[in-house]
C-alpha cells in the first residue's frame, strides 16, 4: 500500500519515548541488563540498519540462547499472496530460536507462498506449521539452516496488562518498510479488556476470551501479527486483524493477549492438532454436492476426509462456473474475503451466497493466483 | 460532521488515558519509566510553553477565494513560509494566509519543488513575522515525541493551529510517487493524527524545533482520515532546496546516470552506468558495490533512492565504491529528473480539497483585485515559478560585480595575466591573454589559442583542459553586453566541492557552454566557476581566489584548477594582471 498526499483542506537532550526492550528471560533485573537496556534504548538503530549478530551453535550452546532484547528484532515482515482488499503482506513475531513465527490465521498463511524478512534485512522462505482458527492464530516457520538461530520472544515472559497501560505496537503496517528498513511503531494505551464481537464479511471473529482494545490505530493493513509491548518492554499482545465491530461497524483496534495464546502456541509448535470448538460450526444445512453441480456447474473433489482440499473436479460447460472461468484442477483459495481450506468451506460460502450477486473466487492455477467472478444463479424452488 | 466529532473525542480520550495512566502508575523495575505525577505535570507545563512559542509560526494557507486550504510554517521575519506543493498548486499566484494572531495576510507564490511536494510562499505586510527554528532532522530517531501543528478539517476559524501529538514511527522512509511525481524520500513517519488540511504544516520535536513538513499519509479502507501512519518531509531536505525556491524556480530533483539495485547481504550494487556519464569517466562500472552516496552509507537500493531524492538537480555529491580493483571515491554532478518547464498538474484527488475531503466544485472562484504593489511581486515566465524573485537574486549578484568591472569590460581591452604554473618539480612562467574574442596561453615554447565564440576542446592545454574556455566565459561575465549569454538565471545555493562551503549560484548559458558561478556574500566576484563545454568531457572547474584590482582589471590572486579525477587543486599563481588596449 502506498501513501497518498493529503488534500489541502542538532538534537541535544530531546525527550524520546522510551523504546523498551523485551526483557530477556535469563537476565531479568540484573544490573548488566539494565545498562544494556538503557544504552540500546538510547541509540536505537538510528540509521535504520538494524543488524544483530546471530549466535551460532559454534559460539553458543542452546542453553544460553537468549530471547532478543529489542522488539523490532523479534518482528518479521511477511510477504505473500494477496488479492483485492486482502493484503499481500503481514507481520509476525519470532517465538523460538528455530524461527517459529506467530501470526494471525489469515489468507496469507492459508495460501502459502510466504516470505519472511527478518530485522537484519535477510529474506527467508516460510512454511506453515499449524493454524488455530479458534484463536485466530497461526505458527509458520522460517526455513533456515539448522545452524541458524533467531532472536526470539519467550512467551513465558509475556505478561498481562491492565487497561490504562501505555503500549507500543510494532508492525509492518502499510508495507511502509518495504526493503530492509525496520518496522513501524505507534504508541497508545490499552483502553479496555473485553470480549470482541466483530466480523469481516461473513467471517466472525472467533476468539472468545477478552482482547485488549487499543486507543491507537494499530490494526492497519499488514499490521496483523505485530507485537504490542508495555512501557517496560514486556511483551503483552499480538495485533489482530483489520476488522469492524459487529454492531457499530466501527473499525476496531485490538490485540490478543499473548498469555491467552501461550498454550495454543506451544501446541502448534509441537504440531498438535487444534480442534475447532463445536460452536464455530455453522448450523445451517450446507448446499449438497448435487445442487452445487446442478445449479452452479461446479463439481468439487469428493469430501472424503474432513479437510479435503478444495480442488475443482469438473466444470459443466455453459454453467455459471464455466462462465466465471473456473477450470478443472483449480484450487479454490478464497471466496469473497473468506479463506477456503476445504471442500466444506466452499459449500459453506456458497450456501450463504445471495442469488443475483457476484462472488469473487480466487483460485490457485499452476501456482498463479487468479481472481474470478462467479454469478450466483437463482435458488431452486 | 459525525466524523469530526469522533476524531476530536478520540484524541481527548487518549490524552486523558495517557495522563491518568502515567500518574497512576506504580514505579516498576524499569529504569527509564516516567515515575511521578510531578514529572507528568512538569512535562505538561513544558509542552504548553513550547506550544506557545511555536504556534505563532504556523500558517493557515487558503486560496485567494478563501475556499479550501492547508497549512504552512513561517521561516523568515520577512514572511517566507514553507508549505506543500499540493497545497499551493491550484491556488493561483496569490493566496490568503491566516496566523494565530487572527489576522489574514496576502501571500505570493515564490518557488516550487513539485517532486518533493514543497512550495515556498511569502506572506506580505510585516517585517517581523514569527518564525520556526529548524532542528537537524538527520538526528531524529524512532520513538522521538513529536508535535504536528496545522489546520486539519479547517477547524480553526481564528487560525490558531490544531495540535496533535505522537511519536516517530520510523525514519528514512521512502514513499513511492504513487501515480504522481510527488516522491517522499528519507521522510519521517509519525503516528500523530494527520488529516486533510494538515498538509504543509510543520512537524516539531518536543523541544519545539522544526523537523519536517507533514504532507502525506497512508490511507486505505477507512477513508481519507488519519490512519496512524503519516509522513513528513525532513527539514534537512527542505533546507537544501530552500535557496533555490527563494530564487523563484521550479526546482528539480537530481538523478544519477547510473542505476543501483539491492545486492546480497545488504549491499547496494551498481547495475548500469551510462556511456557518456561523468560516473563512467570516474571509473564506476556495473557490479561495483556503492558504499556511500553524499556521505551516507548504503545497504540497499532503497537507501540510495532515499538519499538521492533529497538533493536538487545540479548539486555535486561525493560517492565511494568498491570493485575488484579496490576502493574509489569521486564526485559527480546530479542531472535533472523531470525538467518541468511549468508547474505540473496534480491529479484532481491530490489537490484543492475542501474540509470534508470531498473533491470540490469545478467552478472558478472570483479573484479579488489585488493592489499594484502586491501584483508586481509576481512575474510569469516560462521555466520559472515566479521570475520576480529570480530577478531580485540576479540583481543582487550581478550589480555589485558590474560596478567593479567597467574598465575591464571595454571591448577594446585585452587582459594580460602573468602566471606561475607548477609543472613537475618547478614552476614555469606563463602568459594569459584574454580578449573579447579569444583566450591565449603561452607557456615556454608552447601556445594555445581558443576562440570564445566557437571553442575547440582539442585546443585546450592538456594539463588544464577547459581552462581557456572557462576564462573566456569569465570575460563574457564581465561584459556589459546583454547578449553575452543566451540565458542567465540565479540558481539558489549549493555546497561547492571541493571548497565544501555553501555558495550562491548563478548559471549562464552560452551556446552549449553552461557556467555555474559561485558567489559568497563578502565579495562581488565569483569565488569559483564550473564550466561544462562538452557532453563527453569533464567540466572545467576553477577556484578564483584572492581577487584584487590591478589598474582597473580585477583579477584573482591565484586560479585553482580542480582535477575531476582526483579532486585535487593545482594553483596557478597570478603574478600580475593588466589591461592592454587593442
Image (cartoon, coloured by chain):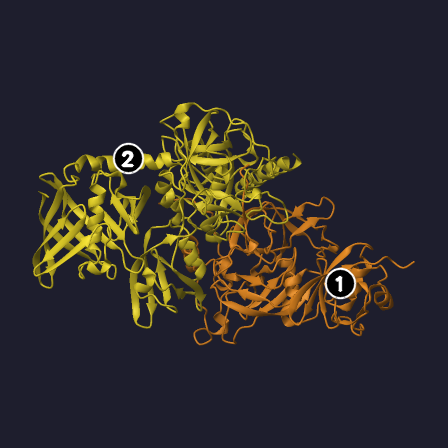
Image colour for chain A is orange
Q: Are marks 1 and 2 in contact (CB under 8 Å)?
A: no
Name the chain under label 1.
Answer: A
Residue assigned mark 1? A324
Residue assigned mark 2? B395
Determine if marks 1 and 2 fall on one subunit: no
Tell us which disc is closer to us: 1 or 2: 2
Image check: B303 left or right of B352?
left
Image quarter for residue B507?
top left
Within 10 Å of the Cα at label 2, are there few (<14), some (14-19), or many (20+) other Cα atoms?
Answer: some
Q: Nearer the viewer, residue B296 or B580?
A: B580
Q: Position of residue B20 (x, y in %)?
A: 56, 39
Image check: A161 left or right of A38?
right
Q: Secondary structure at mark 2?
A: helix
Can residue B205 be seen here? The reply is no
Q: Above or below — where is A154 with respect to A7?
A: below
Q: Nearer the viewer, residue B191 or A188?
A: B191
Q: Position of residue B210 (x, y in %)?
A: 41, 40
State the residue at coordinates (52%, 45%). Answer: B216
Q: Position of residue A8 (x, y in %)?
A: 53, 38
Task: Tell me the distance, in whole angstroms, between the alpha carbons under discs 1 and 2.
Answer: 70 Å
Image colour for chain B is yellow
Can residue B122 be seen here? The reply is yes
Amino acid at each position: 500500500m502506498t501513501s497518498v498526499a493529503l488534500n489541502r483542506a542538532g538534537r541535544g537532550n530531546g525527550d524520546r519515548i522510551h523504546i523498551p526492550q523485551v526483557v530477556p528471560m535469563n537476565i531479568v533485573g540484573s544490573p548488566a541488563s539494565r545498562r544494556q537496556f538503557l544504552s540500546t534504548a538510547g541509540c536505537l538503530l538510528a540509521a535504520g540498519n538494524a543488524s544483530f549478530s546471530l549466535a551460532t551453535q559454534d559460539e553458543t550452546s542452546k542453553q544460553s540462547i537468549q530471547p532478543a532484547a529489542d522488539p523490532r528484532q523479534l518482528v518479521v515482515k511477511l510477504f505473500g499472496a494477496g488479492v483485492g482488499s486482502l493484503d499481500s503482506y503481514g507481520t509476525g513475531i519470532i517465538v523460538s530460536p528455530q524461527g517459529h513465527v506467530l501470526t494471525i490465521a489469515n489468507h496469507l498463511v492459508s495460501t502459502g507462498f510466504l516470505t519472511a524478512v527478518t530485522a537484519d534485512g535477510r529474506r527467508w522462505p516460510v512454511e506453515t506449521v499449524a493454524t488455530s482458527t479458534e484463536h485466530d492464530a497461526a505458527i509458520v516457520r522460517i526455513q533456515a539452516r539448522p545452524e541458524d538461530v533467531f532472536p526470539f520472544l519467550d512467551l513465558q515472559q509475556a505478561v498481562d496488562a491492565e487497561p490504562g497501560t501505555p503500549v507500543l505496537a510494532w508492525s509492518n503496517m502499510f508495507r511502509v518498510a518495504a526493503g530492509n528498513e525496520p518496522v513501524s511503531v505507534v504508541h497508545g494505551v490499552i483502553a479496555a479488556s473485553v470480549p470482541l464481537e466483530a466480523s469481516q464479511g461473513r467471517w466472525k471473529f472467533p476468539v472468545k476470551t477478552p482482547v485488549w482494545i487499543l486507543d491507537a490505530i494499530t490494526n492497519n493493513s499488514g499490521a496483523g501479527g505485530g507485537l504490542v509491548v508495555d512501557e517496560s518492554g514486556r511483551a503483552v499482545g499480538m495485533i489482530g486483524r483489520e476488522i469492524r465491530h459487529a454492531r457499530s461497524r466501527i473499525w476496531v483496534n485490538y490485540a490478543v493477549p499473548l498469555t491467552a495464546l501461550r498454550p495454543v502456541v506451544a501446541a502448534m509448535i509441537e504440531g498438535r492438532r487444534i480442534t475447532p470448538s463445536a460452536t464455530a460450526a455453522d448450523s445451517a444445512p450446507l448446499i449438497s454436492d448435487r445442487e452445487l453441480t446442478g445449479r452452479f456447474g461446479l463439481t468439487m473433489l469428493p469430501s472424503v476426509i474432513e479437510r479435503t482440499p478444495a480442488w475443482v473436479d469438473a466444470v459443466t460447460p455453459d454453467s455459471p462456473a464455466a462462465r466465471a472461468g473456473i477450470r478443472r484442477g483449480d484450487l479454490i483459495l478464497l471466496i469473497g474475503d473468506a479463506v477456503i481450506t476445504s471442500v466444506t468451506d466452499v459449500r459453506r460460502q456458497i450456501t450463504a451466497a445471495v442469488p443475483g450477486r457476484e462472488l469473487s473466487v480466487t483460485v490457485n492455477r499452476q501456482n498463479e493466483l487468479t481472481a474470478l467472478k462467479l454469478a450466483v444463479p437463482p435458488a431452486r424452488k | 460532521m459525525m466524523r469530526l466529532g469522533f476524531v476530536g473525542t478520540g484524541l481527548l480520550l487518549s490524552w486523558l488515558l495517557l495522563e491518568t495512566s502515567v500518574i497512576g502508575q506504580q514505579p516498576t523495575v524499569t529504569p527509564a519509566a516516567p515515575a511521578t505525577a510531578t514529572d507528568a505535570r512538569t512535562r505538561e507545563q513544558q509542552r504548553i510553553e513550547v506550544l506557545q512559542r511555536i504556534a505563532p509560526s504556523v500558517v493557515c494557507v487558503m486560496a485567494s477565494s478563501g475556499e479550501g486550504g492547508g497549512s504552512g510554517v513561517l521561516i523568515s521575519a520577512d514572511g517566507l513560509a514553507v508549505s506543500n506543493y499540493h497545497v499551493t498548486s491550484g491556488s493561483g499566484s496569490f493566496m490568503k494566509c491566516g496566523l494565530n494572531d487572527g489576522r489574514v495576510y496576502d501571500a505570493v507564490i515564490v518557488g516550487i519543488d513539485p517532486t518533493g511536494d514543497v512550495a515556498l510562499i511569502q506572506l506580505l505586510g510585516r517585517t517581523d513575522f514569527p518564525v520556526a527554528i529548524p532542528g537537524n532532522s538527520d538526528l531524529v530517531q524512532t520513538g522521538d515525541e513529536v508535535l504536528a501543528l496545522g489546520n486539519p478539517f479547517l477547524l480553526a476559524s481564528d487560525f490558531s493551529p490544531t495540535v496533535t501529538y505522537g511519536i516517530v514511527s520510523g525514519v528514512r522512509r521512502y514513499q513511492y510517487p504513487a501515480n504522481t511525481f510527488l516522491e517522499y524520500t528519507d521522510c519521517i513517519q509519525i503516528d500523530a493524527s494527520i488529516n486533510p488540511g494538515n498538509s504543509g504544516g510543520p512537524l516539531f520535536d518536543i523541544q519545539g524545533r522544526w523537523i519536517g513538513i507533514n504532507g502525506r499519509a497512508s490511507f486505505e479502507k477507512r477513508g481519507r482520515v488519519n490512519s496512524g501512519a503519516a509522513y513528513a518531509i525532513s527539514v534537512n531536505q527542505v533546507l537544501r532546496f530552500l535557496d533555490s525556491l527563494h530564487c523563484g524556480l521550479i526546482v528539480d530533483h537530481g538523478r544519477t546516470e547510473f542505476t543501483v539495485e539491492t545486492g546480497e547481504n545488504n549491499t547496494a550494487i551498481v547495475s548500469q552506468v551510462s556511456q557518456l556519464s561523468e560516473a563512467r569517466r570516474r571509473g564506476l562500472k556495473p557490479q561495483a558495490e556503492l558504499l556511500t552516496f553524499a556521505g551516507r552509507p548504503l545497504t540497499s537500493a532503497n537507501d540510495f533512492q532515499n538519499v538521492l531524492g533529497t538533493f536538487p538537480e545540479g548539486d555535486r555529491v561525493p560517492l565511494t565504491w568498491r570493485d575488484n580493483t579496490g576502493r574509489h571515491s569521486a564526485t559527480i554532478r546530479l542531472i535533472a529528473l523531470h525538467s518541468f518547464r511549468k508547474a505540473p498538474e496534480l491529479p484532481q484527488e491530490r489537490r484543492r480539497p475542501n474540509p470534508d475531503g470531498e473533491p470540490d466544485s469545478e467552478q472558478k472562484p472570483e479573484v479579488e483585485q489585488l493592489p499594484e504593489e502586491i501584483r508586481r511581486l509576481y512575474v510569469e515566465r516560462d521555466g520559472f515559478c515566479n521570475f520576480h524573485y529570480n530577478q531580485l537574486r540576479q540583481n543582487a549578484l550581478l550589480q555589485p560585480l558590474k560596478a567593479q568591472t567597467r574598465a575591464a569590460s571595454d571591448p577594446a581591452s585585452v587582459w594580460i595575466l602573468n602566471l606561475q604554473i607548477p609543472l613537475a618539480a618547478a614552476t614555469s612562467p606563463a602568459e594569459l591573454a584574454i580578449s573579447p574574442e579569444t583566450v591565449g596561453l603561452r607557456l615556454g615554447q608552447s601556445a594555445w589559442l581558443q576562440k570564445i565564440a566557437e571553442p575547440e576542446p582539442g585546443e585546450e592545454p592538456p594539463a588544464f583542459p577547459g581552462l581557456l574556455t572557462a576564462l573566456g566565459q569569465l570575460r563574457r561575465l564581465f561584459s556589459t553586453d546583454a547578449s553575452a549569454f543566451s540565458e542567465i538565471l540565479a540558481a539558489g545555493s549549493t555546497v561547492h566541492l571541493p571548497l565544501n562551503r555553501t555558495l550562491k549560484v548563478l548559471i549562464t548559458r552560452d551556446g552549449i557552454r553552461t557556467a555555474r558561478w559561485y558567489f559568497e556574500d563578502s565579495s562581488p566576484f565569483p569565488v569559483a566557476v564550473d564550466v561544462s563545454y562538452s557532453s563527453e568531457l569533464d567540466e572545467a572547474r576553477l577556484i578564483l581566489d584572492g581577487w584584487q584590482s590591478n589598474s582597473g582589471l580585477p583579477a584573482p590572486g591565484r586560479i585553482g584548477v580542480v582535477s575531476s579525477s582526483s579532486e585535487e587543486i593545482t594553483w596557478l599563481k597570478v603574478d600580475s594582471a593588466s589591461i592592454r588596449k587593442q
